[in-house]
Each structure stands twice: as C-alpha cells, then as structure tokens.
Amino acid sequence: MTIWLVEYFGSRELNTLFWVATASSAPFWILMLFWPRSRVTHTLCRLWLAPPLLGVFYLYLLYLANDLTGLPRLEGVEMKNVRRFWAHPILFIALWMHRLAMDLFVGIWIASFARFRGWEVRFELLLVWLLGPIGTLVFAGRYWVATVISKFRARQDSEAD
C-alpha cells in the first residue's frame, strides 16, 4: 500500500494513533507532578520500566510502518532525505513516540536525582514534559548554582575552622 493511500484513507486512524502515542506518557508525568512522594509513583516511574514500555509502542509503530507500506529508503543523510524519510505518517508518529520516551527518561532521572537531594522539581518536570530540553536546561542551571553555592560554603567553613 502506498503512503498516500494510508494518509488518505487512514487519516482518522492516524490521528487516533497520534493521540494515543501522545497520551501514553501522561500518566507517568501526572504521577511525578502531583504525587511525587507516592509509593505508586516510586513503583511505576522507574528508568527501567516506564521508558521501555513506551519503547515497545515505538517498536510496534516501526513494525506497522514497515508492514503497511514498507519503510522508505533513506538515500543519504542530507537534511532533505532525512526529512522525506520521517514524512511517512506512521514513522512521524514513531519519531514523536521516540521524543516522548526520551523526555520521560530524562524526567524520571531528574525526579530520582531530586528525591535523593530532597529537592522539589515540579516546575522543572513540567518544563521537561512540555518543552523537553528547556526543562533539562533549567534543572541543570539549578544544579550548577547549588553546586557552586555548596562549594563556596564548604570553603568558607574550612577557612573558619
């Protein structure tokens, strides 16, 4: 089946698939944002559990794309060829799923790191969920500032002794 047939006759199904993919990470984010100290959150939001679950969906999308239309040939790594490859409607949803899984991985890592340090990171997690790298940058900035302040205080304490 050609790609345009999939897009034309399957537009409703593709849209549903896109929204299912988009919603697939939401339960984990909601747990981390609203119930960060809950036992359920600690059980489900683990690096080895949540992102691999989304990875299974990602693999299914790759299989589906190959099974329905065959994967398009990637003829070099120039931007136009890569863009053409990801223009395949199911591969585009797979790319979106990949982003969601990676953002969730980063979010769970931040939540775990913050739990260890006793930090509140809801704002940073919300930014990672909605804006990806911007949330990671905000968290990294907070970490760097905290590290500099802690080293400065340690130096002051050692000089005072």
Image (tube, rainbow, N blue to C red):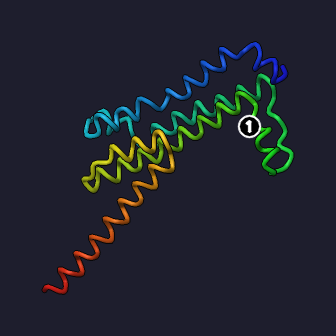
The residue lying furthest to the left in this view is 161
Q: Quadrant of residue 17?
A: top right
**Residue 78, position as x, y percentages in the image:** 81, 51
Left/right placement of residue 137 relative to residue 85 reads left
Q: Is residue 96 left or right of residue 66?
A: left
Q: How many marks?
A: 1
145 left or right of 71? left
Q: Residue at x 35, y 49 (%)?
A: 112
Can you identify the residue that label 1 sits on?
86
Residue 130 horizontal/vertical position (percent): 47, 39
Label 1 sits on a secondary structure element that is helix
Q: Quadrant of residue 29?
A: top left
Image quadrant occupied by the N terminus: top right
Q: Which residue corresponds to the image point at 24% horizontal and 81% vertical from the top-left?
A: 155
Locate the C terminus by quadrant: bottom left
82 horizontally vs 129: left or right? right
Q: Residue at x 53, y 44 (%)?
A: 102
| Placement of 110 over or under 36, stated as above or below | below
Q: Residues within 10 Å of mark 1 (few under 14, many from 20)?
A: some
**x and y percentages locating residue 82 in the rendered image:** 77, 44
Question: Tag 1: residue type?
Answer: Trp
- Quarter of the image for residue 108 reads top left
Q: Is residue 8 above or below residue 81?
A: above
Residue 105 percent coordinates (x, y): 48, 45
Is 21 located above or below residue 126 in the figure?
Answer: above
- The one of 3 and 39 positioned closer to us in this rendering: 3
Measuring 24% from the left and 53% from the top, which residue is drawn there? Answer: 118
Frontmost residue, 91 versus 145:
145
- In the depicted view, which residue is nearer to us: 75 or 57? 75
